[in-house]
Image (cartoon, rainbow, N blue to C red):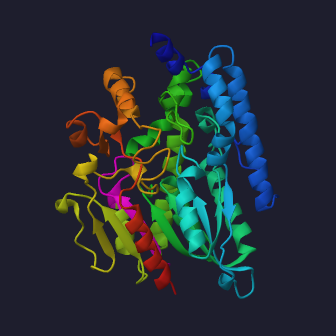
Amino acid sequence: MMQLLNDIFSAANPRHQSTGFNTHWGGEKLSFAEYVAATRDKLRQAHAKHADENADENADENADENADVEKIIEGNAPFELRPPDENKEGLDKPYLRGILLVHGLTDSPYFMRYLGDFYQAQGFRVMAILLPGHGTQPGDLLNVTWREWADTVAYGIDKLDAEVDEIYLAGFSVGGALSVSHSLLDKRVRGLFLFSPALKITPRAALANLHKLYSWLAPSAKWVDIKPDSDLYKYESLTKNAVYQTYLLIKNLTAQLKVQPITIPVFTAASVDDVTVDASATIQLMVSASHPTSHLVLYGNDLEKKPINFSAEKLEWLNSAFPEQKILSSAHTAIVLPPEDSHYGAKGSYSNCQHYFPDDMEKYEMCNKHPQRMLQGEITAENLKLGVMKRLMFNPNFSSLKISMKKFIESLP
């Protein structure tokens, strides 16, 4: 165990360095199919390099990782889907509607897969991007900038524009902030789908870049958290640069919204118990969203947190507690994935127990060893007092979320 801790906390560990693959945006001259293929190749090289670096020390684990390389690439890679219904043809272009899917910070396109399938079934041409710094290993977020994330979104919009009459954006967390920001700059965007959007974070994030004054001497100072990074599709470790870039993105977006309100249709799903982003900013955005079809799905189990400044048509309040499933509340991480997901779902292979690492290793090991016995929900102080719990990674209300999105799509002008 001590060796594991020493390895994880060592900033010299290979996964805490840059791979050199997908560290910066540079695919603007590629077709979307070429971009997908080129990114998959970068992912393959990055994960092969990681396996080689650990071959001697962890032979058995490396054999397992090699067997899963294609699975890892598939989940982290950008993807595209075409609608099956030929009646969805556009007026001047191959398709009537298209949607760009933008994942969140430290996440991957895996989190957008089920949404992609849903939009495809609704007749959308679907494209999902991989933000620079993601999909490889946490060290690739050491030097990336939010402008490169924004450039990747702009690229996806341009590729969609060549094929569809109407463009929509769907963003999760930081992907939501990027989507809102781009919609204010680009009149081609006809509507937004936002999931746990990162519209406000702690003011302390403004100080995250100060590490550069001393991290050359203490490399671990470049990190907010250094975790085991056992997940296949999401980083568990977090760089201070990633936090600072998110701060700069949200600062820029806040300035945009002060001079340019959102007038296009907006569909949003969020949790009032979210501890990653400030749900009040999401509520305020939806209060100001002026289009009559805009709709907010809000998860919570405390009626005192239910906002009162919405019409019944605009706000859909859904219970987020399911005692029979040991679910205490919804979570930031729980909006876009269904219970049946084999990795993050109700019987999934992954347990999010990182909130216990490394301060309470007994609870960390218990949470991972007996995941089906654990309470689930957002990792609020109140919930953590109730017993050992894992952070909820799926949405028990995912079926009803799809119904709500379908109604919203049917109401679009």
Name which quarter of the figure residue 387 lies in. top left
Residue 384 in sight in this render: yes
Along the line of sight, which residue is nearer the eye, 48 or 6?
48
In the image as oriented, which residue stretches furthest toward the left? 304
What is the x, y in percent for residue 361? 35, 21
Above or below: residue 159 compared with residue 345: below
Q: Over which residues does the magenta segment extend?
A: 264-280
**What residue is at 31 percent from the left and 73 percent from the top?**
315
**What residue is at 28 percent from the left and 57 percent from the top?**
320
Above or below: residue 133 compared with residue 34: above
Name which quarter of the figure residue 138 lies in. top right
In this picture, residue 25 sits left or right of residue 10: right
Along the line of sight, which residue is nearer the eye, 280 or 7?
7
Above or below: residue 81 compared with residue 61: below
**What residue is at 49 percent from the left and 16 percent from the top?**
4
Above or below: residue 279 compared with residue 77: below
Taking the magenta stretch, the answer to whether it contains residue 277 is: yes
